Image (spheres, grey):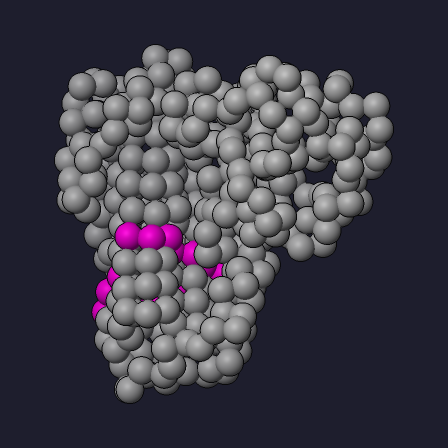
């Protein structure tokens, strides 16, 4: 039996992050939601998502599956609840099916109401849905701690690097090949995980919880506050606080980035900063693709930036700004609160020409020696044709 991590129409509440990926491949903590479910349930998994995105993942054949809604927060206590399920049993919450074991005689289809196939239904008691941008960074500390306990259990860290000050070393794990030079790691406020071949240059100040992905770099003098995840193949610099960077993105220079979610293949130009708190300390409202309007998002929220988007030097992002997929943001003064997909500039909100947008994405990926795949191009063309025209 395999896990089938299925998306629903609610994935739209996490656009633009889920415009280019299935919800299960969102990164929180050290790795993705999919990775966590496979660990917690000790089963391999497949992903079922909207048709235009399914080209990025394996096809789903008929078979028996442990269905799990993709936007559920993977925790040990919830996984233990799922493990009690038998064939034909399911658990639900107010939004619908949470998990269940079902034998599918035909290939499962995105959009199917799987809950209708179950007669033995019980309420879920430990389910939490990731259904707002702020959940990603607000729940990241919990995910870092859970993942840290897994990755460090029964293993020996590479130990303290000479010239590095480590506070609470029992809460620090350094993978093979990582280099840390004359910096301070304070894990008294939460665990710190340094991935394989990651580099922390001289003079960095880091407070946990923090996770630095494989082959990522913190440039000299970087200041990091938890809970922050910088995914694989990223570059971090300046001041970063309570941020999730999915991977392959750069915030390499001075400037502040806080309470934010940054997709893959993004680049924040030198001096780019965001506001994460309104001057009157009132609730931040952010653009929702699903509601087609602004919705409340708590007291603190910085930037939500979709994949393949970039900002020019000295860009100033307003509190609670949502930047779509494949945008090139530049212009004087604070940015608009919502910058649609394939936007060129910011004030005039001109639209990228598709061919130029794809060429720019290709060039950015080549900087990290990655070639864009045909399936990724298909996804971007679909977004260009169907969203925010």
Question: At 28% from the left edge and 41% from the top edge, which residue is drawn?
Answer: 265
Above or below, 14 relative to 302:
above
Above or below, 70 relative to 389:
below
Q: What percent of the width, then of the height, locates residue 212?
A: 38, 61
Is 332 one of the magenta-colored residues? no
Q: In this view, does 387 lie to the left or right of 105?
A: left
Question: At 58% from the left edge and 36% from the top edge, which residue is drawn?
Answer: 2
In the rendered image, the quadrant that contains the C terminus is top left
Residue placed most toward the observer, 112 or 183: 112
Residue placed most toward the observer, 238 or 325: 325
In the rendered image, the quadrant that contains the N terminus is top right
Q: Is residue 67 left or right of residue 92?
A: left
The span picked out in magenta is 217-233
Q: What percent of the width, then of the height, locates residue 73?
A: 62, 45
Q: Is residue 40 left or right of residue 264?
A: right
Is residue 24 among what the camera can see?
A: yes
Q: What percent of the width, then of the height, locates residue 366?
A: 15, 40
Question: At 26% from the left edge and 24% from the top edge, which residue is drawn?
Answer: 374
Q: What percent of the width, then of the height, locates residue 216?
A: 29, 58
Residue 264 picture quarter: top left
Q: In this view, does 147 lie to the left or right of 257?
A: right
Above or below, 163 relative to 343:
below
Is residue 302 among what the camera can see?
A: no
Marks counted in the figure total 0
Question: At 77% from the left edge and 40% from the top edge, which residue is drawn?
Answer: 85
Above or below, 318 relative to 212:
above
């Amino acid at each position: 039996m395999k896990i089938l991590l299925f998306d629903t129409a609610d994935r739209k509440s996490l656009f633009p992050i889920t415009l280019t990926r299935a919800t299960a491949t969102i990164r929180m903590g050290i790795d993705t939601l999919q990775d966590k479910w496979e660990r917690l349930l000790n089963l391999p998994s497949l992903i079922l998502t909207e048709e235009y995105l399914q080209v990025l993942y394996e096809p789903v054949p008929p078979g028996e599956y442990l269905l799990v809604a993709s936007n559920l927060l993977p925790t040990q206590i919830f996984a233990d609840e799922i493990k009690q399920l038998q064939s034909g049993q399911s658990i639900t919450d107010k939004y619908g099916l949470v998990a269940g074991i079902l034998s599918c005689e035909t290939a499962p289809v995105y959009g199917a109401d799987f809950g209708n196939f179950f007669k033995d239904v019980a309420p879920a008691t430990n389910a939490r849905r990731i259904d707002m941008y702020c959940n990603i960074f607000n729940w990241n500390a919990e995910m870092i701690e859970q993942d840290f306990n897994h990755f460090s259990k029964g293993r020996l860290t590479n130990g303290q690097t000479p010239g590095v000050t480590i506070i609470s070393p029992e809460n620090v794990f350094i993978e093979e090949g990582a280099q840390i030079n004359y910096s301070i790691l304070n894990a008294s406020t939460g665990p710190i995980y340094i991935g394989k071949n990651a580099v922390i240059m001289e003079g960095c100040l880091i407070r946990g919880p923090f996770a630095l992905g494989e082959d990522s770099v913190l440039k000299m003098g970087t200041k990091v506050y938890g809970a922050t995840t910088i995914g694989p193949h990223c570059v971090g610099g300046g001041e970063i606080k309570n941020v999730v960077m999915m991977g392959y993105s750069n915030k390499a220079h001075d400037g502040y980035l806080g309470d934010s979610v940054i997709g893959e293949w993004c680049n924040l130009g030198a001096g780019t900063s965001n506001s994460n708190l309104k001057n009157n300390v009132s609730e931040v409202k952010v653009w929702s693709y699903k509601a087609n309007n602004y919705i409340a998002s708590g007291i603190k929220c910085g930037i939500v930036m979709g994949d393949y988007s970039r900002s020019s030097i000295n860009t100033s992002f307003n509190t609670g700004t949502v930047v779509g997929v494949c945008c090139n943001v530049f212009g004087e003064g604070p940015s608009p609160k919502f910058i649609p997909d394939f936007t060129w500039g910011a004030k005039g909100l001109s639209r990228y020409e598709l061919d130029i947008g794809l060429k720019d994405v290709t060039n950015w990926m080549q900087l990290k020696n990655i070639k864009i795949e045909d399936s990724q191009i298909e996804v971007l063309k679909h977004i260009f044709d169907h969203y925010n025209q």
